Image: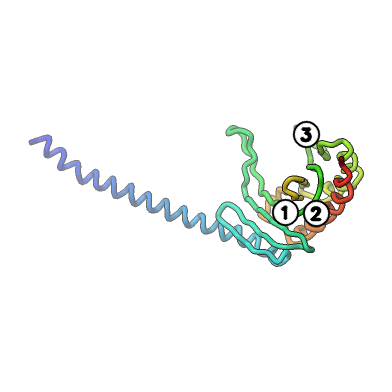
Amino acid sequence: MSSGVVVLESVPDIVVGVGFFITLLVTAVFAGHLLEGASKARNRRALTPLVAMIDGSLQCDHQSGRIRGQYQGRSVSITMIPRLDLAQSSETERRINSFEVVLEGIEGTSDWRIGREGLFLKKWVASAPDEALRDRLNLSGLVSLLESSGAHPQLRYNAKHRTLALHRDVQPRLAPKPEQFRADLELLLHAVRVNSQINSLVR
């Protein structure tokens, strides 16, 4: 009998505990939805001033934002990822506000890249699998153009996908100002012209 009394007396505590857990779970889910909604709205606000500049369409979620459009007859895609984690291990953390502009349908025969490299003392480097192409890149003026454009961008050409991409860490902003965005688009168009001159010559 006494054991039955113990069980009966413990039932209300279990019910209260379950009720508290369910309430806590519902509150956490509701708060999560609110945070995701706020992050999505933040991403949309950051990209909205740039949409009209490429007559684009905007898509956002709580983690990122994307625009697809056209600029000077070229297909353009933009990807914005706030707080992108570049850490190499769980013991370190390096987060950037990633912003990448990609021109599509760019012809060329070989991949290449220009960016800052080095573990301690970083310097601007033009990289390509072909030495002749590396020499042409170094003589093209693209390295000094990137160096003077601020925020240490990287410029990458992918021959397989026919894309030319300019990537920046735009902290503390989520997206560049419209004038910087237009300057980056013009820089990419210039890089397209350079690529057509030097990358079609590689054999």
Q: Is there CB contact under 8 Å for labels 1 and 2?
A: yes
Residue sitting farthest toward the right: 139
Residue sitting farthest toward the left: 1
Camera-side mark, 3 or 2: 2
The CA span between labels 1 and 2 is 9 Å
Q: Is there CB contact under 8 Å for labels 3 and 1?
A: no
Mark before the other along the chain sequence, 1 or 2: 1
Mark before the other along the chain sequence, 3 or 2: 3
- Badge 1 is on which residue? 101
- Badge 2 is on which residue? 188
Disc 3 on helix, strand or loop?
Answer: loop
- Left or right relative to 5: residue 105: right
Which three-letter amino acid code belongs to the residue tagged 2? Leu
The CA span between labels 3 and 1 is 24 Å
Report x, y in % for residue 122: 79, 36
Report x, y in % for residue 183: 80, 58
